[in-house]
Image: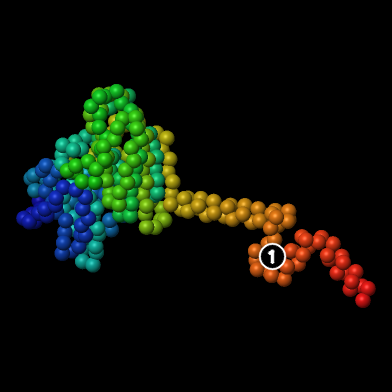
Amino acid sequence: MLLFYPVFLLAFSKGFHSFTVTHKTPFHIRLTKNILYFILDEQPPASVSFSAINKQNQSTPIPMNSLSHIQFFDTIVYVTAPKKVRYTLHFWLVPNELCPGISYASTADMAISTELTAATLSSDFCIFGQAGSSSYSADFLYQTNSTRSRVEFYKHPSKPARKCKKGVKCHYSSSMPFFLRISGASGYKFSSSFLYKVHRSNIDSYECSFKTIPYLVDGPIQMPIGHLNVRHTKCVSAAEDMLSNVTLISGGIIVCIMLLILLHCAGVINLKIILGCTKEADRFKELRQNPYASHIQQDAVESV
């Protein structure tokens, strides 16, 4: 299908962006030296149209259902919305040479941990997380025989925000989305552990996974085969974490109540004093001074 795309293509700097697509403000960008990564925290409405336009000016619709991430090389990407529909795109624009190989997507309801290994790593790779959360953090620990290996966290493609050392747990946290770049280990044995956490504004169920990011290069979507062995993946949801905290707090309250009752029964404390019963407090004090006071008082009453 032939399509005349807009003459005025949008210009974005390298880095992370959010752009709201409306009927009057469609999204359209030409990719030549950069890779475009869409991060789809929310599935777009069916009325929002995604298409790629090749060098022959032919348009191909892009099915975006069930995708959390997708990357584009060397093409024109066009996103439109009908009237009264708004959709916010979160995306990265990264230089081709920074993430030239297979890229992976890590998504979590609250946290995901996994082990990534390769008998022989075939290429450098990047790991992209989520968008639309209030905070993000990750721990990465790796081993490799390569002496040129590098693991770096980026929140802007121009300069790494954190550089990691081999064999040392590397932690990074940010209020902005970030990605990891693993390089210099191609052709060598590689093993790592990865923990990714996000703090979301709601506890609605969200996908938890670690998988390759599908890509599109001047044609249909391709599903790459990963070169990593992904195993021992564990997920923690926000709802599970909240339930765990409630259970922990409830257990602590019950233990405290039982301890207070035991101390009261042993005569160490008087719960009535603690609760503000002053008359009983005075009586308790007299009884401690003279344990037979109550019997004496009773005999006096009977003699009268």
In the rendered image, the vertical position of residue 282 relative to residue 184, given as above or below:
below
Q: Secondary structure at mark 1?
A: helix
Q: Residue at x 20, y 38 (%)?
A: 99
| Residue 44 quadrant | bottom left
**Is residue 130 toward the left or the right of residue 74 in the image?**
right
Residue at left offset 24%, top offset 43% = 161
Question: x and y percent of residue 15 in the render?
Answer: 19, 48
Q: How is the image coloured?
A: rainbow
Q: Is residue 167 shown above or below 105? A: above
Picture coordinates of residue 185 (x, y %)? Answer: 25, 28
Residue 215 visible here:
no
Instruction: Using the image, determine if residue 160 lies above or below residue 85.
Output: above
Q: Quadrant of the C terminus?
A: bottom right
Q: Foreground residue, 304 or 4?
A: 304
User: Toward which corner of the image does residue 263 lie, by quadrant?
Assistant: bottom right
Q: In terms of depth relative to the viewer, which is nearer, 237 or 157?
A: 157
Which residue is identified by label 1? 272
Across and down, in percent, residue 120 comes to 29, 24
Point out the residue furthest to the front here: 289
Label tally: 1
